[in-house]
Image (cartoon, rainbow, N blue to C red):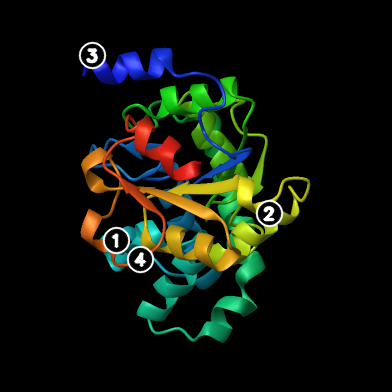
Amino acid sequence: MASVVGYYVNMPPNDFGKLRLAFFDIDGTLIRRDFDGTLSLKSRAFNYALGTAFGLTDIDYTKILGRRLFRLTDRTILKRTLAKLGYEESDYYAREDALFEAVDEYFERNYRIEANTGYYPLPSVTTLLDCMRASGIRLGLVTGNIKKHSLWKMQTAGFDGYFTTGGFGDDAEQRADILGIALQRNSDIATECICHFGDSPPDLEAARACGIKAVAISDLGGGTHSRDELEAVGYGLIVDGWYDLESISQYLR
């Protein structure tokens, strides 16, 4: 471990090759949440919205969708939950505005009094971000989370002010479309100088669709998918921990 820390400390500036813009997914990439048996603010807000817009009671989408919700955007989460409950896609679109108005209402009413969010950074990710910032690399978020929720999560996990750009669940439903919008917002940087960092096959697939590099962290480093699942995509670099700056640097050259 000492050599890993030493590598961080002695890493020269701009040791990220051509990289000038790094996009990061949030859940499973930057942060995880300690599960203490309680639902997160986001989960409670979504369940509240399903009840408000559709009259559903005792709904918990996290149990309906299971583990694979990690790879879903916020819009897809709501759409698939409703589909599991027998609703048509048209039903979702007819009440989409009402759903997200209810989500926002619940969030605004509760986020200030959320005592213990449970969010914590993945191992070594803060050091990785600090190294990138020291090298003058622009940092952004590309996530299926609503922007307001994304920034709140970053603040509670200690990343307030790190990210200055990005694409969010408000922008589009599909991850590749969200990434494409983030790229449009940063058109001053060439695509060969941009990389997306994530933890799921859809992260890698979105980067491939948009023609940029990708790095994904496996479940060994705190991600949500195994190395085998990530390697099956056949694109990008897979690492088992954000401490592996040497592999990341070599990939970005």
Is there a contact, CB below 8 Å, between mark 4 and mark 1? yes
94 vs 148: above or below: below
| 10 Å crowding of disc 4: few (<14), some (14-19), many (20+) | few
Q: Residues under labels 4 and 1: Cα distance? A: 5 Å
Query: Residue 234: which disc?
Result: 4
Name the element at disc 4: loop
Question: Do the residues under discs 1 and 2 have CB atoms within 8 angstroms?
Answer: no
Give the labeled residue for mark 2.
Answer: 183
Looking at the rendered structure, the kind of residue marked 1 is Glu
For marks 2 and 4, give the one nearer the viewer: 4
Which residue in the structure is indicated by mark 1? 231
Q: x, y (%) of residue 123?
A: 31, 29
Instruction: Give the residue at mark 3.
Output: 2
Give the residue type at disc 4. Gly
- How far is mark 2 from mark 4, CA to CA? 22 Å
Label 2: which secondary element: helix
